[in-house]
Image (cartoon, rainbow, N blue to C red):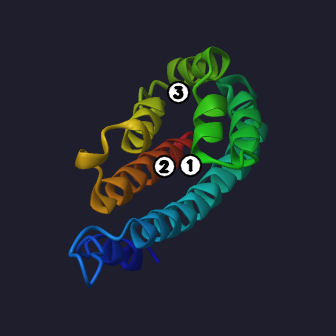
Amino acid sequence: MLSAILAASRQAIPRDTLTGTPDYTRIQESVKSTEVNDFGYLQQVLSKLAVDSQNKSAKSPMAGFDSLYSVFRATNASSSVFGQNLTLCTPTAKGYFEATAASTGNKNFTICLYYLTLANDYTGPLDSFTLQNLSNDFTLLAINLLKLDGVIQTYP
């Protein structure tokens, strides 16, 4: 699925066949399609993080995985990337990540930067917006969430 999304995002900007100007309706449809597909994938990753955190909290109750479980569960319930950002990157959630990072000796618990980059794709200047950047930023976020899952999985 991810390779199909990346391939679709590399397509040229749709243009009106008569005027040669960008066809903004088709561009909006492409952006929405990319967002729906990538957001769905992020929800699957967040769901996995919630389950893995919950399972790990039973084995290592002092490492803070129970707190991460509640954060991932709430984040997964968000209906948009912006909602995920607002849930996952609160000061309280960041404190949970920092505490778990200290407990596990692993500093790979920072992912809010990737949500900010994604937000900039939506709020930045239109002349610098590309589907390729949007898809790449979704992919980087997913990869870093999966790296976080790797930390959770390998903790004793």
Crowd class of label 3 (few under 14; some 14 to 19; many from 20; radius 10 Å)? some
Which residue bears the numbered disc 1? 153
Rendering coords of residue 124 (x, y %): 34, 37
Vertical side of 110 occupied by 72: above or below? below
Secondary structure beneath disc 3? helix
Circle 3: residue type: Thr
C-alpha separation, residue under disc 3 versus residue under disc 2: 12 Å
Vertical side of 38 occupied by 77: above or below? above
Residue 150's disc number? 2
Pick the quarter of the image with the C terminus. top right
Residue visible at 58% across and 45% down? 81
Q: Is residue 104 left or right of residue 64?
A: left
Q: Quadrant of residue 30?
A: bottom left
Crowd class of label 2 (few under 14; some 14 to 19; many from 20; radius 10 Å)? some
- Viewer-proximal residue among 54 and 28: 28
Residue visible at 45% across and 38% down? 119
Q: Pointers 1 and 2 in contact (CB under 8 A)?
A: yes
Circle 1: residue type: Gln
Secondary structure beneath disc 1? helix
Which residue bears the numbered disc 3? 104
Q: Quadrant of residue 13?
A: bottom left
Q: Is residue 83 left or right of residue 17?
A: right
C-alpha separation, residue under disc 1 versus residue under disc 3: 12 Å
Q: Pointers 3 and 2 in contact (CB under 8 A)?
A: no
Please name which of the two marks, 3 or 2, marks the residue nearer to the observer: 2
**Which of the two labelled residues, at mark 3 and mark 2, occupies the earlier sequence position?**
3
C-alpha separation, residue under disc 1 versus residue under disc 2: 5 Å
**Which of the two labelled residues, at mark 1 and mark 3, occupies the earlier sequence position?**
3
Pick out the residue farthest to the front: 19
Circle 2: residue type: Gly
